[in-house]
Amino acid sequence: MISAAIVAALSAPAAFAQSAGGDTYRPDLATGQGNWFVSGGVGRTDGGTADRFGSGDFNTFHSRDGRRTGYQLGGGYRWKLGPQWGLGVEGGYTDLGNIKVSNAFNDDPVDEHDSENALRGWTLGGNARFNLTPSWYLGARGGYFRASDNNANYYNSAGQELGLKSGGNDGRNSWYAGVGTGWNATKNFSVGLHYDYFRAKSGELRDPVTGDKFDGPKRSTALLGISAEYAF
């Protein structure tokens, strides 16, 4: 019994190394072949306080002003480029919930209405997956993000519209990036935990009374949540 246990203990690392190597990424596909996939995810934002990567507060079990529930929907195509990894393209839609911003003219809070001011936008980018084992993957993604501009409809704390207009230079073209890890339940279906950061700008705004132009609120935020993917 002891000898068998020792043999099993000594052979476990070798077995893991063997499973971690080899053809772990979609063994049913040859290198160069690919597959379509659809994906979705839901999680909690960091409250819209992030103005640079990694500056959000992610105690997801503690409520705070500005944190919202967000979701993502997308799809794409991924090619198998090696025994353990694939590289693809993706596109989708992200809704990161309402973000509390500051009044452009002073530090008073702006009352943003849910129906008009949810932070959302379209994404177009690339993604990669590396399968450490047939069941365990690491993932990364990133690309272009075009955030909503709320149609320049911002409100003060009394619910009165501020009357801002587009400044003619929308400036909403930005980017997103993320990393994650998870479990390949089958060759087609996987679930994981992902962290995605969205550099969101609302573009340039103009006060029609004074003619002054200024940058709209920077609403960059991140989403930590559960994701799922089905590959065809």
Image (cartoon, rainbow, N blue to C red):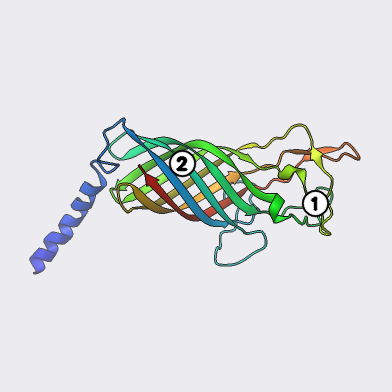
Picture quadrant where residue 199 is located: top right
Residue most extreme to the top:
32
Residue 115 in percent (x, y) is at 69, 53
**Residue 207 placement, left or right of 7:** right
The front one of 94 and 181 is 94
Q: Amino acid at mark 1?
A: Asn
Residue shown at 38%/47% (left/top)?
A: 230
The front one of 207 and 151 is 151
Placement of 27 over or under 56, stated as above or below: above
Residue most extreme to the right:
209
Question: Which disc number belongs to residue 1?
Answer: none
Residue under label 1, please give it: 103
Picture quadrant where residue 151 is located: top right
Quadrant housing the C terminus: top left
Residue 196 in percent (x, y) is at 52, 48
Density class for disc 2 (Cα within 10 Å; few <14, some 14-19, many ≥20) is: some
Residue shown at 84%/59% (left/top)?
A: 158
Residue shown at 33%/39% (left/top)?
A: 85
Density class for disc 1 (Cα within 10 Å; few <14, some 14-19, many ≥20) is: some
**Mark closer to the observer (1, 2):** 2
Quadrant housing the N terminus: bottom left
Placement of 185 over or under 151, stated as above or below: below
The front one of 8 and 228 is 228
Q: Secondary structure at mark 1?
A: loop
Q: Secondary structure at mark 2?
A: strand
Residue shown at 63%/50% (left/top)?
A: 50
Q: CA distance from mark 1 to mark 2?
A: 37 Å
First in sequence, mark 1 or 2: give its number: 2
**Residue 12 placement, left or right of 124:** left
Residue under label 2, please give it: 75
Q: Amino acid at mark 2?
A: Gly
